[in-house]
Structures are given as structure tokens and as C-alpha cells.
Amino acid sequence: MNYKMIGKFISRVLAIEAAFMIVPLLIGLVDGSRADTLAFVWAILLTAAGSALLGLLCRHETSRFQARDGLVCVGVSWIAMSIFGCLPFFLGGSIPNFVDALFEIVSGFTTTGASILPEVESLSRCILYWRSFSHWVGGMGVLVFLLGITSPGVRGSGFTMHLLRAESPGPDVGKLVPHMRDTAKILYLIYIGLTLLNILFLKLGGMGTFEALCTAFGTAGTGGFGIKNDSIGGYSPYIQNVCTVFMLLFGINFSCYFLLLAGHIKEVFKDEELRCYLGMVLLSTGLIAFNIRGMYETVEETIRHAAFQVASIVTTTGFATTDFDLWPSFSKTILLCLMFVGACAGSTGGGMKVGRLLLIFKNLRRSIHRFISPNQVQVVRNNDRVISEEVLNNTNAYLAAYGILIIASFIVVSWDGYGIATNFSAVVSCFNNIGPGLEAVGPTCNFGGYSILSKLVLILDMLAGRLEIFPILVLFSRRTWKR
Amino acid sequence: MKILIAGGGKVGAALTRQLSAEGYDLTLIDNNPEVLASTVNQYDVMAVEGNCAAMDVLKEAGVEDADLLIAATSADEVNLLCCLTAHALNKKLHTIARIRNPEYSNQVYLMRGAFALSMNVNPEKQAAREMLRLLQYPGFLHRETFAKGRVAIVEPRLDVNSPLKDPPLSQLPDIVKCRVLVCTVVRDGMASAPSGDFVLKEGDRIYVTAPNDTLAALLRNLNIISRPVKRVMLCGAGRISYYLADLLIKSGLEVKIVERDYTACRKISELLPRATVIQGDASRQATLENEGLPEYDALVSLTGLDELNMVISMIGSDLKVPHVITKLGHMESTPILNSLPIGSIVYPKELCSNTIVRYVRALKNQTGAAVAVHSIAEGQAEAVEFLVDKDTKYCGVPLKDLNIKKNVLVVCIGHGADIEIPNGNSSFQEGDTLILVTNGDHIIYSLNDIFQD
């Protein structure tokens, strides 16, 4: 294991994090909220010190980097980032318990949006900004950001591929252009562009700049931290619709936008994953709207709420405009199923990803065909491209790990005495980075009531879900730490 | 600059390594997903799976806005078709094809026109030429020529009795009684530019710049005694053997080829009527001894297996054959190989990729590009030849007053036919040829890059 190289990367990640904290610090200075401003000063100093110390310890690194190092690097980076990132909450006293603060920031970075706070409107603006901004950073990934701004690697720079693979969601991660730095830059430019567009549309709806920024960050990262106690429910129908559209846009594979910009419009509309994703959204919205008919005053309102909730859950954002826990069972079940599905691969959304599910279904169909005619040779295709057996095997392994982890967490969390629906939806919601669950953790409630152990388990679930399980799982394998 | 490489074999891999280190946008096309996966994990390049001669695959690799295509698959015909198709998709594209079948060697110029090739490369032929150069001066382990053959950078074969053992390297010109300059020393596998008071230890290797007409004197005064090579034994009857035997026979040498496979023996004896072809297992010492190897002046191991070549060369060294050359096709050059008794090592893929890298650099800066690039000391140092043109800075300024980058050494200045090994008072003028050696990572694209500004 190349500890020094990993240390160097973590040192840089922390340096970037410290730089990101400067904006909330400035907001705090303007607002004059003393305790939180001071907390940010200390957090920046501590993070910068941690970065400097690591950087100093890991000066003489060699650039030999293997797949294992990439996984460990990403896993440990996210944990380090979370520990330093929760300092403003903890030091400023907005969240006095350290585990609670950690839960809140992990929920931010992993773009989950699950909160332990019963209400957020009393928080200072700098804390609210940092909560929402953590979604934006976590959405595309801080290591991808790092790859975009570091100087082009001279020797053996292919190792950056391991980092991209470990941090980007999806079964088969590839580069858009030959250079990693350019790939990372393109991804972030698309991300920034869409976020700015989102802010603009929110502003046109009459939202204040600060609220528009925070809401756009929450939407872009498909996170879901609101700055109002009733999430998006109190805003105008226009703003709710803008949010619906942008949540769906951020749930689309970013390489589709790259293809669009490069002028390959046909390919984008032929993309199987995109079609499946949009079809699923339309179908679920239709079913739910039919199911909840009569609960709201107008048809427009019914469809608006149905579409918003579907978009919010399928992209794993977790905003809410209404308390869907009051909806009939059928609608809730559909939402629970959508929680598993998640957004497209290569987007900022979480969950299992539409693309991966497509592969699992196609592979299953092939297995059935094999039972019928054992000698048939058949390959699995996606967008007319043959998918290698290795990718299929990894997808199956992912599915197995996913199932086992959810069941294990479910069992641990059940100790706290909540109902089965609450516990199960809490685990599913955290693992898939959504935010709200059902019943006691529904859209109007919070995770504050769970015990410390359950919170720690849920923290790990969120990290595992965001990083697609393996970067976190390898940290628990004894073989990883062996020479 | 966007470059496509078709074929991730030996040459393709060497090119990927060199060109990605120089920061170009590389896309590798190969039909083997394993090759692609391992390349993508090592280098910052993009990979496209498929047949490189197929239009869809080329389009997917982005041929329409690429600048250069290098076709280096194992089949000449595929390479040609690949270049032809790519050129039809993008008229501005430069194309380089590897064509190595001896049967096509006479029609290369014809094909260059018909297939719109910018350049063709033949690693085997290049390797054969390199080996011929070595055999012409058997006292050198390496020999690279510059300035139209007037200057050479050589690695003399140093032994325990070398007169260079005790005095510092700065006295070398006095010892060898001619104008030479040590440009690189290799100690414990690490190359560096020597200081004047550097004293050689056993196991060190040096690279020396010398005008071509002093090479004989250099050898004589270093006590490296060598008879001119008259009889050469080649093991293996592949493409390099054919090209080398052809060159050797044309220079009037006696050639014997040992090959295990009967059909290959037949074929090469049909192509080369004046060579003696023996069917036998060259890996057995008895075969080589029966064929009279101890009486030969040189042994060249050219079979398709690197390991076998090393064994054959070791047998040759053991039988005290004065000059042994080993071809290594797959292996990367590493310091470990130099400690084996296998004589000079020739890496055909490196020669070939060096040629292509030179072309790429010339394409990048149309004016002021290097005339010749050779990597020395297992790729740790690079010798580059430039032409001084009107854009070159500091013409006429003595070298000692110039601020030249660390690790860059001006090793030769050619004023027309007159070759000067420079000292602090030397200077260059427009029209001169400069040869530089860089020890280290940075690359010199144009002559003005060497100045520290």
C-alpha cells in the first residue's frame, strides 16, 4: 500500500475543504453571528493544520498507485473530510453532540439530506450555507475536483483512473476525453453551468439570492437539505416545478450532456438508461397521481406533488413539498421502490442506478435463457455495446453486497425500538442517499431519536451508498492493510 | 495534439508510454480488452475497443478531429487499411503505418503515395541497421550517430584494465588523445551528467560524444582491442535476421544463420542465396559449438523469445565470442539486464517509437524541431540534434556566459563539415548543428527550451 501517496491526496482534499469553508466564514462575518464565525475560524485552522501536517509527512511519495490504493484513498478521504467538515457544527454549538454533527455532515457530503435537527430555521446563515454547500461538493466528488485542478501527471498518471472509478457512481466508469484532468474539468464545468442555470431560474421565481444558492446546491448535489422546516413546500408552484425539473436534470448521466454539447444529439436520445429513467418517472408520476386523486384541491396540484415527490425520491434528493407519509400505501410503496432504483449512472444521484438495474435485468434474462437452452452463447448489450463479463460480475457482486449491508444495518438499527417501516425506510433512505424515510423518519420528522450506535451505522451506510460500497468495504478487509 | 494509436502491442505500448509522458491527448485502439484495461490503468489515455480499420471504431476514437494516427497492429495490411480509412474520414490527418514484411520493402514508396502515408516505420529494419552500426565498431556497446553520421555518441566497453580507472573524467581527452566529451555516466542504474572531477568505479558505464573520425583512436587509446568483424552467426530466422543478414552480406561479411524450424530455414535461404542456413536448436550449446561459434567474431541472438536470446548470448559470451548482440522484443530496458553477460542489447520497439516520437515533436512545432532524437542509458537520458535557425536566441554568445538549464549538456557543435566538441568559449551561429544531451525528465521541444529564462 502506498500510504504516502494516499496521505498526499488526503492532505490536498483537506486543503480544498479548508478553502471551501472560507465562504461561510465570510457570510458569518457579514451576519455577525459570533459563535458560528468563530467555529469556522477554528475549523479552517484545524483543517489547514491537518492538511499541512499530512503534506509534510508525505513529502517524498512515489507515484506507484494500484487499484487497492485508489479505493482506500477515496474511502479514507471521505471519512477525513467528514470528520473535519463537522467541526463548524460541533464547535459553534449548533449541534452539541459530535456524533450528531458527524451524521449531519456525512449526510451532507453523501448528498443524503437526512437530518438530526428537528428544525433548521433558527440556524445561522453560515451554518445553513455550509450544510447545503456540502451537498454540492459531495455531488460530483471532491477527488474529481482535485483531479481537475492538479497539474497533469507526468509519469504513470493512469493511476488517477482508480480514483475516478472509486468516486464516480456507475457500473462502468470511463473518461470522456483522453486526459483525466480535462475529463474532470468538463464534468465540473457542466455541473457548475447547470447549477448557475438552476439559480437563475429560482431567482426568476422571486427567491432571495441566499435561498436560491442553498436550494440550488441541494438540488445540484441531489442532496435535500432545505433551509426551511417544510423543505420546498412553502414556495410557489413555479419554484416547486423548477426544482422538479432540475432534480431530474441532475439525475441524468453527465456524459449525456457532454455528448449533447459535442453535437451527438441522436445518441443521447437513444440512450437506453435515459429512456428507462424518464419512462419510469412518467409512469410512477401517473400511477401516484391517480392513486392520490382527490387528496388535493386541483388536478394541477395533484400532479405537481406527485411529480415532485417522484423526482425527489428517484434522484435521491429528498426534498418534499407535502407529507407523503399521509399518502395511501400504494403510493408509498412505489416511492419506497424508487428509493432502491436511484438516478442514472454518472449523475450526482445515489441509489443503485438505473443503468446497473438494466444490466442486472438483462443478465437475469440471459440466465433464464441459459436454463432453457444451455448451449446458447449470448452477450449482454447496452446501447448496442457489448458489456464485458467482468462488469457483469462486479454488478452482481455489488447487488449482493448491497443486500447484505442493508439487512445487517436493518438488524442493528432495529434495536432502538422503532417500527419496522421506520427502521427499514431509514436504512434504505440513508444507504441510497435520499434523506427522508417513512413514519418516524418521514419528510416532516428527523433522525435525531436514534441511538449513537444506530447513527454510526447509518453514517457508514451513507458513505457506502455514496461511494458505491467497495471503497468503504475494503477498509474493513484485513487483506487491505496487509503488505 | 490529438493522437490515435492503433494496436497496443510492443510498439504501441512503448509509444503510449513515451507520448503520454509528453502530455498528448492519446486514444488507444485495440481489439483486446485486457490490453486496453491494463493500459488505461497505467497511463492517462483513452481506450477504444474494436477493429482499428473499421470506420465506426475510428469515428468512436475521434478520428475526425485527430491530428495523427499511428497504425502499429501486428498485420501490415490492417495498418494500411486503417490509415486509408482514417484518411478518407479526415483529410488533414497525418498517418504513420508500421510496414515490416520484407516482401513489401521494395514497394514502400509506392504505398506511401497510394495510401497517403506521412511516414512508414519498420522496427525490424531499424533494428538491423542499428546492429550493423554496432558490428562496424565492435568495441562499443551502443552507438548513435548524428549530424549526417559525422558525430557519434558511444558507450565504450570498459573493463578492469581500462586506463580510465583512476584519473578524473576531465582528463579523458588527454588519455585518448582526441576531442571527446563524456555526456552521461550511469552508476547503479542511475544516469547523470558527470562533473569534471568524477572518478569512475567498477561497474560504471559512460556515454561519450566523439567525431566519427576519432572513434578508432578512441578505441585504441582506451585499450579496447577489437578486430574488425568478418564472420557473424545469427540465431533465429525472423525478419530482423533477414534484414541484418542482407546488410551484412552486402558489406562483404560471412553470415551463418541457425534456426530450428525447417520451413523458416527454407524461406530465408530462398531469400538470401549467399547466407549459410543451418537447421538446429540454437539454445543447445552443442549445436552452436558444432557450427564453430568459438571461431566467429560476432553472435547475434534474434529468436522470437527474449529469454532464449539471453541464454544464447550467455553461451556466446561464455565461449569468448568477441562481440555479442541480444535482441529483446518484449522486455523493457532495465538496469538489471545490463549486468548480465549478454553483450549489447537492441530494443527494436524503442528504436521505432523514438522515430515516431521525433515525428510527433516535429509536427508539434513545425519550425525548430529536433532533427534527430535518440534515447540513451535505458531511456534515462536523451540525445537530441537541432539546427540553429534565425529564431534561435544567443547566437554567437560563448557557452560559459549562457544560462542553460540544469542537466542539459551541449555536447557537440557542427559548423558545416567541421565538428567541434565545445568548451566554455565555444559559441554557435545560424546554420550550425547542435547536439544536446538531457539527463532527466524534461523534454526539449525546440532549441530555445534549453535556456533558463
Image (tube, rainbow, N blue to C red):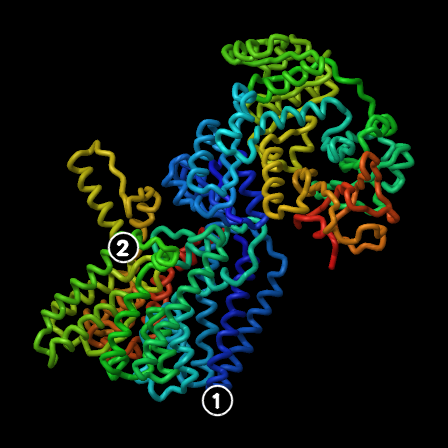
Left or right, B97 with respect to A255, comes to right
| Crowd around label 2: few <14 · some 14–19 · many ≥20 (10 Å) | few
Q: In the drawing, what numbered circle is on residue A269? A: 2
Residue at the spot 26% in from the left edge and 83% down from the top edge: A235
Left or right, B286 with respect to B78, comes to right
Left or right, A438 with respect to A483, comes to left
Residue type at mark 1? Val
Viewer-closest of B400 and B300: B400
Residue at the spot 53% in from the left edge and 42% down from the top edge: B16
Q: Quadrant of the C terminus of chain B?
A: bottom right
Numbered disc in front, either 2 or 1: 2
Number of marks in picture: 2
B155 over A262 or under it: above or below: above
Viewer-closest of A105 and A349: A349
Q: Work out whether residue B184 can be spotted.
A: no
Q: In the drawing, what numbered circle is on residue A30? A: 1
Viewer-closest of A63 and B27: B27
